[in-house]
Amino acid sequence: MKILIPCLCGPTGVGKTEIALLFAERYNFSIISCDSRQVYKYLDIGTAKPSIEIRKKYDFYMIDIITPDKYYSAYNYAQDTERVIEKLRKENKRFLLVGGSGLYFKALFSPFFEAPPVDLKLREELKRKDLSILYEELKKIDKISAQRIHPNDSQRIIRALEVYYLTNKPFSYFLNKKRESKYEPLYIGLNLEREFLYQKINERFINMIKDGLIEEVENLLKRGYNENSPGLNTIGYKEIIFYLKGWITKEEMIALAQKNTRNYAKRQLTWFKREKVNWLLNHSKEETFLNISEILKKYNLI
C-alpha cells in the first residue's frame, strides 16, 4: 500500500504559503517546498520565499539548496525530497508538500528514469541551431519521441537530442525505465476566480519591486550570475535583466513580467486540472484552513 502524502498545490499568487504557515503554527507541520525556483539561493523576493525569520521559526525543506549557476532537474528534486520525506517519517513528524511546480510533483509520484545530467555546453550548441532542423534530426533518431513532442517545444526537443548524444540511446528508450513510486499524492488545490487571481498577481509583482526585487537582481549580476544562469531563467528576474540591459523600459518590464506570470498561472491550472485534486476557493484563510483540516482528518493525516 502506498504512503499518502498531503500536497497543497495551485497557481502562483493564490496564497499557498500563508495557509501552510497556519498548519506549521497550529499543528507543528514541517513544510516541504515544491517550487522549482525556491531551490535556488539568493532568489528571495521574486520567488516569494518565506522570510528568514519565518524559516527560523518553522521547519522548511527544499529551499536554498543550490546556486543559480547550477542546473537542477525534477529528477534531482524527487531524489532529494524522498530523503526529506523519509527523515520526517522516521521522526514521526507531520509535513505538507507545498508548491505549484507540477513537474516536480510528477517526478516524485511518477518517478522519471535516471537520465544523464545536463550538459550545458552541448545544450548551448543545440540552442544556436534552428528549431525545425533540430526537430527533423529528432525524427530521424527517435521517431517515438518526435511523435510525442510538439515541433515548437524547444525545451523537450533539445533535451531529447541531448540525452541521445550523451548516451547513444533514444530518449524513448529511457521512458520505459520508470520505477514505481511508494508515495501517493493527496492533492488539495487552492484557486480563485480568474479576474481576482490575476489582480493579485499584478499587485504582488508591484510589491516585489517595492520590496527591492530590482536591487536583488542587480546583486545577482554583481555576483557573476547572468541571463544564461539556469536559476535566472525565471519570470520576474529575466524581465528585470532585460530592463537593466536597457532593452525595455521599466513600465514595459513590469507589464511583461505581470503578463508572463498570469500565463504561468494559467499553465499551472491546466496541469493540475489533469490530476485528482480537491479544489478550494481561497477567499478566507481561516475557512480554507478549516476545510483543509477536515480533508486531512478524513485521511488520518492530522
Image (cartoon, rainbow, N blue to C red):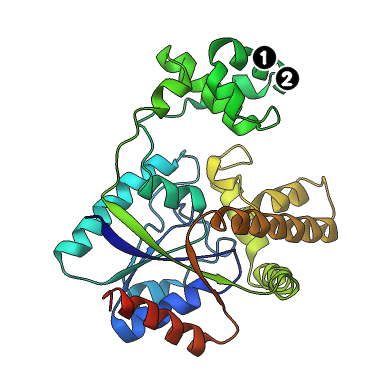
State whether residue 61 is above or below residue 24. above
In front of the other: 48 or 94: 94
Is residue 236 in view from this perspective?
A: no
The reply to whether residue 87 is visible in this rendering is: yes
How many marks are shown on the rendered structure? 2
Residue at image mark 2 = 132
Farthest-out residue, left: 90
- For badge 1, the amino acid type reads Glu
Give me the residue at 32% from left, 78% from top. Answer: 298
Please name whichever residue, 67 or 131, is drawn nearer the observer in this view of the structure: 131
- Residue sitting at 60 percent across and 33 percent down? 155
* Vertical side of 68 occupied by 156: above or below: above
> In the image, what residue occupies the spot 30% across and 69% down?
95
- The reply, left or right, for residue 106 in relation to residue 182 is right
Q: Is 1 left or right of 277, judged from the image as shown?
A: left
* Labels 2 and 1 touching (C-beta < 8 A): yes
Q: Position of residue 32 (x, y in %)?
A: 36, 63
> Which picture quadrant has residue 25?
bottom left
For the point 26% across and 72% down, the residue is 94
Q: In the drawing, what numbered circle is on residue 58?
A: none
Q: Name the residue under label 1.
A: 136
Q: Which amino acid does label 2 sit on?
A: Ser
Q: Which of 175 and 245 is in front in this view?
A: 175
Secondary structure of the residue carrying numbered label 2 = helix
Q: SS class of the residue under badge 1?
A: helix
